[in-house]
Image: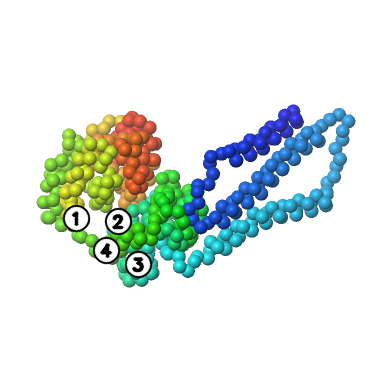
Amino acid sequence: MPVALAVVIALLVIGSLIFHFASPWYFTEIASNWGLIDLTVDITFWVCGIVFVLVNLFTAYCIIKFRHRPGHKAHYEPESHKLEVILTVVTSIGVAAMLAPGLIAWGDFVNVPEDAMQVEATGKQWSWSYRFPGEDGEFGNTDVRQMTPDNPLGVDPEDAAGQDDVIVTEPIVHLPLNQAAHVLLRSTDVLHNFTVPQFRVKMDLVPGMITYQWFEPIVAGTYEVLCEELCGVGHFAMRSKVVVEPQADFDAWLDAQPTFAETQSGPVGDATRGATSYAVCLACHGAQGEGNQALNAPKLSGQESWYMRRQIAKYQNGQRGTEDNIAVQMAAMSAVLTTPGVIEDVIAYIGTFPDEPSESTIVGNVERGRDLYTTCGLCHGKTGQGNWSANAPRLAGMSDWYLARQLNLFRMTDAAQRRGGHPDDIYGDQMNLLATMLNDEIAINDVIAYINTLP
């Protein structure tokens, strides 16, 4: 039996070594200046790996060498000064070998280069937004109490320094190649963590504090931003993108982003003008925005303005409109809304419609749907009222047949046919991940049947 146990331990060591050196799962290619981080991790692997091999092989040796045998008696030696000295010295060398590179890396990490470009990343359940200082080079003050659909980052409108801040509300940010970036990190709710695996640095976002990290992107490309601090049910879907590109391309992108002042002085919708522009929408969506299932047109009345504005933008920029023939039709019709002012006018006119709940067409198990809706309610609200902060539209009282069709589109495996399949539709991709909890048509009908009971 002791021999068998020793063999198992030895095989465990051999298998671990084979898995480590032959495994395809290792670091992504580095895309920043933080090669020292990789060196620190490699040294840690080597030190811990050597200790793992030696300790386990020594254990296997001892199991065989000192196994119980008739006529042999154990030698009792409670203390060994020589052994204690050896273990203390060897352990100290190993710990120092692991800590020293880390201390050097940390010393570099906390000292941000003076020429680093500043950018702020704001995390909330479960999305990312970004901000750049304007021409004055200063960020304006922010306050979570001032966050609204029209001011999602909570910039203080009374702070002159914030008027020229560049606001990036979509979860895709661009950075210039070979330019150090000083990323200020802010959370509006709970602990989050800003991580781009290829950049090799990460840092927590702590509510009430401004934390930071810095790196210099050295490889152009598009990289995924992850939250690596468990922040709630949507943690795994809290994604964003960083596009690293030459300076000229970055400058052109930054110039196209609005300043805070511009976001606050956009066109104000006029319902009277909107009535004329809505004439094109009326043919399908109805005179009062009540929707028409026969024409595959969902109810619009009662839906939140920020959500309609976002979906029109997605149809116009190509993030939506290719998943099926119905979406293709809507993409073509959205082109009629030619300016932001026209869009605001139509949304204002829709806001004058009476909000009558749509007729229920879906039958399902309400009690089972109640359980399934628990996850949905964390974003869309307990009563399906919607939540702009979580990018979740209203569900209660809307066209249930449309909800069913969209959930099926979110669950499609073919990216070309899947809603949210466009690489820039980050929020749609979140729904791709979350919609998979509804395993089949029955589950979809059950959850929608429960939504139909919500006030």
Q: Earlier in the sequence, mark 4 or mark 2?
A: 2
CA distance for labels 3 and 4? 12 Å
Number of marks:
4
Query: How dense is the environment of label 1, judged by Cα within 10 Å: few (below 14), some, or many (20 and up)?
Result: few
Asked if marks 2 and 1 touch (Cβ < 8 Å), the reply is no
Compare residues 165 and 317 and report the one nearer the observer. 317
Give the residue displayed 84% in from the left and 30% down from the top. Answer: 69
User: What label sits on residue 134 in the rendered view?
Assistant: 3
Q: Residues within 10 Å of mark 4 (few under 14, many from 20)?
A: some
Give the residue at mark 2: 149
* Residue 341, above or below 69: below
Secondary structure, mark 4, is helix
Q: Which mark is residue 262?
A: 4
Which numbered disc, 3 or 2, marks the residue closer to the eye?
3
Q: What kind of residue is marked 4?
A: Glu
Q: Earlier in the sequence, mark 1 or mark 4?
A: 4
Residue drawn at 20 percent across, 37 percent down: 296
**Measured Cα–Cα span from mark 4 to mark 2:** 15 Å
Please say which color scheme the image uses: rainbow
Residue at the right extreme?
A: 71
Looking at the image, is mark 3 or mark 4 earlier in the sequence?
A: 3
Q: Residue 274: x, y in percent? A: 14, 53
Q: Is residue 2 left or right of residue 156?
A: right
Element assignment for label 1: loop
Mark 2 vs 1, N-terminal side: 2
Alpha carbon separation for disc pair 3 and 1: 26 Å
